[in-house]
Image (cartoon, rainbow, N blue to C red):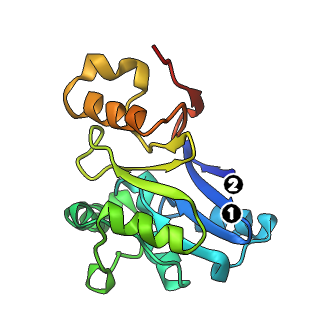
Amino acid sequence: MLIHALTHKHATMYIIASGDRYLLYDCLWQDSYPVIRRGLKELGISYEQICGLVVSHFHPDHGGCSEILRRHGVKMLVTAEQFSAISWLNDYFLQPKNDPTRQYLPLNTAELVPYSCAAATEFLHSQGIAAKVLPTPGHSEDSISLIVATTAMVGDLPPQETAAAFGGSVASSWQSLLDHGVKDYYHAHTGYNRLILC
């Protein structure tokens, strides 16, 4: 599988390619859609080829284009734990100072079906994407990582080398990633990183 990156305003979304099927991990800011549309076009990807979108966590720089992509037919793989965070994101962008050009489309939770991480993983496998969806709270309670072979996409999870200093859920999340055989990872803001393996 190949991993492509699209970056806008210091945040990165990842596009995982498996043959002619694609999975999106994160979808940037509320005004990032032109960047996403152009990136997909340059990669020769149609919306019909995208089997799903996993949002690492519903902060403004990660879930801003969720509803736009959903309206283009992209299936959202959202866990039950993420629903309250979606409500927070919708409320955040309702404030004019946070979206002065009014580009954010509120994500319609009434039209979303919650997945467990296991069910989301099973769905991806049925689409030919050999990826695992894993809960990794720490940066936020709704954080979700995506594992492809020995590589993880971790959103804003604090770096592995700092996990011990954070303790708690950050350390537990990194231990879970290590237990799944992860050796390197892509962060939403620092790009590609090798893990320090003891």
Figure quadrant of residue 97: bottom left
Q: What is the three-letter code of the residue carrying label 2? A: Met
Residue pointed to by mark 1 = 18
Q: Is residue 85 left or right of residue 161?
A: left
Q: Quadrant of the N terminus?
A: bottom right
Q: Is residue 113 above or below residue 196?
A: below
> In the drawing, does residue 37 fall left or right of residue 55?
right
The residue lying toward the viewer, choosing from 193 and 117, is 117
The secondary structure type at the circle numbered 2 is loop
Mark 1 or mark 2, which has the lower sequence index? 2
91 vs 171, nearest the viewer: 171
- Indicate the secondary structure of the residue bearing disc 1: strand
The residue at the point 26 percent across, 32 percent down is: 172
| Left or right placement of residue 178 versus residue 130 in this view | left
Disc 1 and disc 2 in contact, CB within 8 angstroms: yes
Q: Position of residue 46 (x, y in %)?
A: 71, 78
Residue 43: mark: none
Residue 187 in picture, x, y percent from top left: 51, 38
Q: Could you tell me residue 7's position as x and y percent?
A: 62, 49
**Mark 2 highlights which residue?**
1
The kind of residue tagged 1 is Ser
State the quadrant of the C terminus.
top left
The extreme top residue here reads 198
Which one is nearer the viewer's eye here, 197 or 26? 197
How many numbered marks does the figure carry? 2
Regarding residue 66, the answer to whether it shows in the image is yes
Q: Which class describes the residues within 10 Å of circle 2: few (<14), some (14-19), or many (20+)?
A: few
Identified at 28% across, 32% down, the residue is 170
Between 80 and 139, the one lying in front of the other is 80
